[in-house]
Image (cartoon, rainbow, N blue to C red):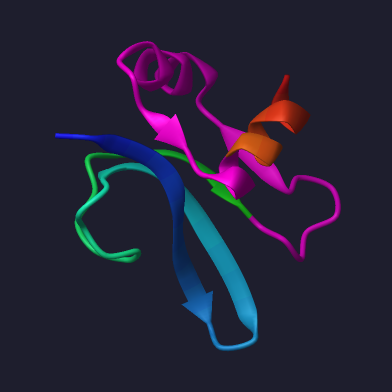
Amino acid sequence: MAVKIRLARKGKRHEPFYHVVAADERMPRDGRFIEVLGTYDPKNKDKRFVGKKERIDYWLGKGAVPTETVSQLLRTMQ
C-alpha cells in the first residue's frame, strides 16, 4: 500500500477548508483516509497551516510521499 500525504477538501462552497491527511493513493480525494495530520485554511491569514509535526515525520519516515501542495506547506511549517 502506497501512502500519500495530501489535502482533503472540507467546508462550504466558496469557503474552502482542507484537512491534511495520510491516505492510500488509490482512494479518492475526499474518500477514506488513514489519519488526519493537520488543517489548512487558505482564507485565514494568521494560521493557514496547523499540523502535527511528530505524526507527519512518522509518516514521512514510513515512506509516505507528500503531494506538491503539501510539500510547500511543510516547508512553511519548518
Please tell me in which quadrant of the rendered image residue 73 appears.
Answer: top right
Magenta segment boundaries in residue numbering: 41-70
Q: Is residue 43 magenta?
A: yes
In the rendering, at what x and y percent does residue 8 appear?
42, 59
In the rendering, at what x and y percent does residue 63 appear?
33, 19
Relative vertical location of residue 40 with respect to residue 11 in this rendering, above or below: above
Q: Is residue 38 left or right of residue 71?
A: left
Relative vertical location of residue 13 with respect to residue 34 in this rendering, above or below: below
Relative vertical location of residue 64 with respect to residue 9 in this rendering, above or below: above
- Residue drawn 32% across the image and 66% down it: 30
Q: Residue furthest left?
A: 1
Q: Is residue 44 magenta?
A: yes
Q: How many marks?
A: 0
Relative vertical location of residue 52 with respect to residue 3 in this rendering, above or below: above
- Residue drawn 85% across the image and 55% down it: 45
Foreground residue, 5 or 14? Answer: 5
Locate the C terminus by quadrant.
top right
Please tell me in which quadrant of the rendered image residue 34 appears.
Answer: top left
Q: Is residue 45 left or right of residue 25?
A: right
